[in-house]
Each structure stands twice: as structure tokens, then as C-alpha cells.
Amino acid sequence: MKRTAFLKTTLTIWAFLSCSISIAQAQQNAMPEDKTAFSLQECIDFALENNRQLIQAGMDVKIAEEQVKEVIGTGLPQINAEGQISYSPKIQRAILPAQFAGGAEGDPDVAIPFGVAYNGNAAVSVNQLLFDGTFFLGLKASRVFQSLSEKQLVANKIDLVENVINGYYAVLVTDERLKLLDQNIKNLNSLYEQTELQYKEGFVEKNDVDRLQVSLNNIKTEKTKSKYLRDYSLKLLLAVMGKDVTDQVVLSETLDDIDASALVIDESLSRPVEERIEFSIINTNEDLKGFQVKQEQVGYLPGLYAFGQYGWNDGGSQLSDMNNWFGSSMLGVSLRFPIFDGLQRHRRIQQRKLEVLKVEQQKKDLLNQLTLEQIQTRDDLESSIEVLKIQKQNMELAARVYEHSKIKFEEGLGSSLEITDAETSYRQASTQYYSSLYDALISKVAWEKANGILYTE
């Protein structure tokens, strides 16, 4: 039971690790090299500019924009030019009746070279889509996909802000824990030195000194663990921010800078779950699936296209003979009308319709999930605030008991067992308090996220 609260804090930090991005991602940053002190807001701003996953999500948005332009391009004129020159060392011969070569009827057929050794041609062709239902639906669908990418980018930003805030709070709470441990070590060390002098003068037993030495060693060990945890938590925060984890950085804020009055539930800030970005994403995904159904359906409509070509050709027995190119041109329209494709398109339509129904079910599940998340985070925050009040009271009581036991011991009215028990109780109470403080802070962050107010653009 003695290490339960400390272990809880450790596990919380490791939970933050599981949500964070690989430390290896943070190798470069856009801030000045001499920037070493960061407030919470500065950490958030830095992460929004430098986080690798967020940068990739931004690239996905740009890719979607280019895909829209690509689809638009299929509706513009398609112009191509081509040309070739060929040489035939052995010209193909055509077998013809003898009369074609001046012979008499009944004479053997003759083989006459058909063509010349050198041939050349060049042409410019233009194709233009006049009507194709799949093009117009495809254009709408690509724009919906672009919107989906943009919304996913916002969702990634919200998750990132949550991780940065939780990571920042983890370091601040551990800092306060270290301050308390330093003060405890100072007090206990002073008491230990006094007791050791009293032992040398024969006023106390060696057992009293040993008990205080054990308590002092325990608290020093706990400080070492907390310091390691603090350093590693800071590296995790830097990794999430997209900053080099070897940079020397300090956090410019402390827990005193956090408005304790903010640890309340303000129902006026609560938003309907339908306004959550996750719900907006699934609505957009539903629209995209609907366009895919329509795009397959309009495939039954005819497609009308215009085309034109202008070309040149020439030939000769020698390459130098090709000096009189003849022009030719052609204009036309083509109509494509699908009649029967073995019911392939029908099957694709059925698949797309089933995908729409699937998204509808996912939408209902998401609605329940987001509603439950609002309820759960509200309950967690209420519980965390209540526990925090109790743990704060316990820590204050344990501090008073420790001070009272210390005074009694110094006056010779108390035992070393009493002072070490009081110190252990105070240390446990403070550990539980800071653990509950961190729980309350991240519960507030989770509640704000569940109500769609953690980050907005």
C-alpha cells in the first residue's frame, strides 16, 4: 500500500507515453535555438507547427486538393501530339494478277512492292468530354473527400493538444512533488543529525538513529525515482511537440499558475455531441459513400465526346525524298451507350449501398459512444475534484501530525517510531494528493474534449 499512489502516478505517465508519438520523430523545430522556456500555450503552438503526424495530415489535405484538380483536368481538352518516321529495308510485296503489271490473262501472278522504304507521319489530336455523368459526380465526391481530409486534420490537432496539455501537467505535478520531497529531506536530515548527536551523548538509543536513517534513505530513493520520472516525462512532452528530445528546455509555468477555480464543471460550455469533429467526420464519410452510389448509377447514362485530328504524312525511296508533307484532318463526335455489362455495375451499386448502410450503423454507434463519453468524463471530473479535496485535507492533516510528532521527539516526549510513522504517512498523503491533482487536471481536459471545447479553429 505504501507505493500504491506513486505507482499510480507512474502508470499515468506511461499511459501518456502510449498516446504520444515516437520520440524519434522530433529532430527539427522552427523556433529560435535560444528558446528554452515554454509556457503551456507556447508548447501547444509549437506542437501545432512542428508535430510530424500533424504535418503529414496537412500533406493529406494538400493531396486531396490536388486530387480535386486532377478530376477537373479530366473534363478539360486532352491534347496530344505524335509523330514517327519508319524505314523498311525490305518492302512488303502485294500479290496481284498479271494484268496489273501489263501481262496477259492466264500469266502467273506478280509480286509488286507495296509502298516505299521511308514513311513518316505526324498528328495533333484533341479530345473533349461533352457529357459524362461519372465525371460530374466524381468531381463532387473528390471535393467531399477534400473536406474529409480537412476535418481529419482538425481531429488530429485536438488529440495533439490533449497530449501536450496532459504531458505539461505531468511535468508540473512531478516538479511540485520534488519540491515537497526536498523539503522533507531537509527536515528529516536535520532531525537525523540532531538525533545522532543525542545518541553520542547517550540521550537516545541507536535504534532511534537507525529508524531515522531508514526513513531518510527511503525518501531519497523516492526523490531519485521522481526525478527520473520527471526527466522522462519532459522528454515525452518534447517528443509530442516535435522538438528534439535532447534540447535543454524548462517549463515557465508552475501549478501555482493554474487557476484552481477552473477545476469545475461549467455546463454552459457543454455542446451537443453532434457538434463534435468526430461526428462531422462520419457525416462527411456518409456523404462520400452516397456520392459513390450515385457515381455508379450515372454510369448507365450515355457519354458524349468530341474529337478532332490534324496530321501530315510523306514517304519516299530515300530519306531526302521526304520534302512534300501532305496534310489531313478529321472532326467527329462519339456516343458511348452501355447496354449490358454482365450486371457488374449493378453489383457494384449494391456494394456501395451496403457501405452506406454500414456507415449509418457506425454513425449510431458513434452517437452513443460520444454521449457516453460526455457522461463518463463529467462523472470522472466530479469524482476527481471530490477526491482531490479529500486528499488535500489528508495531506494537511498528515503535515500537522508530522510537525507535532517532530516537536515531541525534539523535546524528548516522543519516540523515533512515532516520528518515522508520521513521516511515512505524510509522504504517502502527499503522493496521493499530487496523484489526485494530476487526475483532476487530465479529467478536466478529457471533459473539455468530450464537449468539443478543448480546441477550436
Image (tube, grey):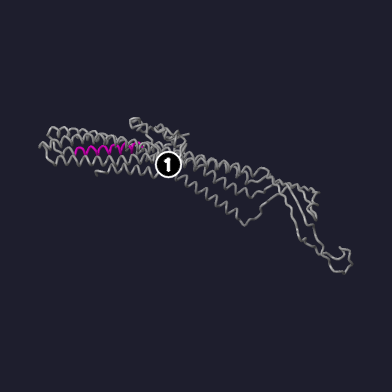
- Give coordinates of residue 183: x percent, y percent: 25, 34
Element under disc 1: helix
Q: Looking at this view, is 213 or 284 the one in front?
A: 213
Q: Looking at this view, is 250 or 307 the one in front?
A: 250
- Res 349 seen here: yes
- Give coordinates of residue 53: x percent, y percent: 47, 42
- Give coordinates of residue 433: x percent, y percent: 28, 37
Question: With 294 as the anchor, is 264 left or right in this view?
Answer: left
- The total number of labels drawn is 1
Question: With 267 as the anchor, is 349 left or right in this view?
Answer: right
Say if 302 sits above or below 374 in the image.
below
Image quadrant in which you'd find residue 5: top left
- Residue 431 is a magenta residue: yes
- Give coordinates of residue 278: x percent, y percent: 46, 41
Q: Point out the stretch of residues depicted in magenta.
A: 421-441
- Residue visible at 50% across and 49% down in the picture: 358
Which secondary structure class fits the magenta region best? Answer: helix
For the N terminus, the image quarter is top left
Image quadrant in which you'd find residue 234: top left
- Residue visible at 57% across and 54% down in the picture: 347
- Residue 328 is a magenta residue: no
Q: Mark 1 is on which residue type? A: Leu
How crowded pointer 1 is (Cα within 10 Å; few <14, some 14-19, many 20+) is rated as some
Q: Looking at this view, is 71 or 41 the one in front?
A: 41
- Res 280 seen here: no
Q: Looking at this view, is 218 or 421 the one in front?
A: 218
Question: With 408 as the anchor, is 447 left or right in this view?
Answer: right
Residue pointed to by mark 1 = 370
